[in-house]
Amino acid sequence: MTFPPPETPVPARVRALAGGDSLVPAWRNERGGLTFRAGDRYIKWIRRDVEIDLAGEAARLEWAARFTRVPRVVTHGGDAREEWLVTRALPGWSAVSEPALADPAVAVRAVGEGLRALHDTLPVAECPWDWGVPARIAAATERGVRVPDALRVAPPIDRLVVCHGDACCPNTLLDEDGWTAHVDLGSLGVADRWADIAVAAMSTVWNYGPGWEDALVEAYGVRPDRERMAYYQALWNAT
């Protein structure tokens, strides 16, 4: 994800959903999807895409909101050309915003602690979504992605949890006291916790520079597992 420029063109659907609220571009993802701040709401918009399902994200948010702090769904919808999702803004700031980037040690610790809290809170037995390796490989294959044979056999599961599914640092919100919430739960589902930990650690390099991976894992509360981290990072990059 990147920060879009202020002059980013606003889709007509987003203008209609904003009503009279002014729009501020917040994020652009690698598939061309856009997120705008509109008053006390965020509007996520994307052209129809086989890799992104905003209706599925809305369902996951509504489920997760029963147990932890995530954005509240205001409305969502779609047609043959586009999809949209509107949620209430939450207090705090992204772990890659200017306040967080000014002190990576604090941000990395909060992301690791927040991920552990998410895993400890969401109930595996009640989660209806699967993000395990076979499901991910099947979904990638359906999209036409050729997954290397070496990734088709995962390491033994350490601990099943409800994974975030995109535990990169920008998807944790912070305040002065630490993590406050999680956003962008479109891939949430049950999997080995290292599927999330490995990606969160890898994302520290993109967002804060090298040298923070182990600090995040330790903030989560475990010792780095090199085999599982290498596997799940490779799977993320391949799929």
Image (tube, rainbow, N blue to C red):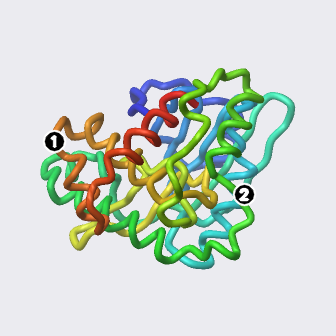
Task: Name the quarter where the N terminus is drawn.
Answer: top left
Residue at image position (31%, 61%) is 112
Residue 137: image quadrant is top right
Q: Residues within 10 Å of mark 1 (few under 14, many from 20)?
A: few
Across and down, in percent, residue 170 comes to 38, 47
Q: Secondary structure at mark 2?
A: strand
- Nearest to N terminus: mark 2 or mark 1: 2
Given residues 214 and 154, the one toward you in this image is 154
- Number of the label disc, if any, that sits on residue 211: 1
Q: Quadrant of the C terminus?
A: top right
Q: Is residue 67 left or right of residue 99?
A: right
Residue type at mark 2 is Thr
Name the residue: 80% across, 41% down: 78
State left or right for residue 76 relative to residue 110.
right
Residue at 70% x, 43% y is 84
Of 82 and 156, nearer the camera is 156
Q: Position of residue 192 (x, y in %)?
A: 53, 58
Q: Position of residue 132 (x, y in %)?
A: 63, 51
What crowding class fits label 2: few (fewer than 14 Cα within 10 Å), some (14-19), or many (20 or more)? some
Q: Is residue 16 left or right of residue 41?
A: right
Task: Find the distance from the CA under tag 2 to the CA under tag 1.
Answer: 40 Å
Mark carried by residue 75: 2
Dot label at residue 236: none
Residue 59 vs 50, above or below: the answer is below
The picture places residue 191, in percent across and down from the top left corner, at 58, 57
State which mark lies toward you, 2 or 1.
1
Taking depth in this image into account, of 73 and 161 the one nearest to the observer is 161
- At x 15% / y 55%, what residue is drawn? 105
- Secondary structure beneath dot 1 equals loop
Residue lying farthest to the right in this orientation: 80
Q: Looking at the picture, does residue 9 appear above or below residue 66? A: above
Three-letter amino acid code at the position of disc 1: Gly
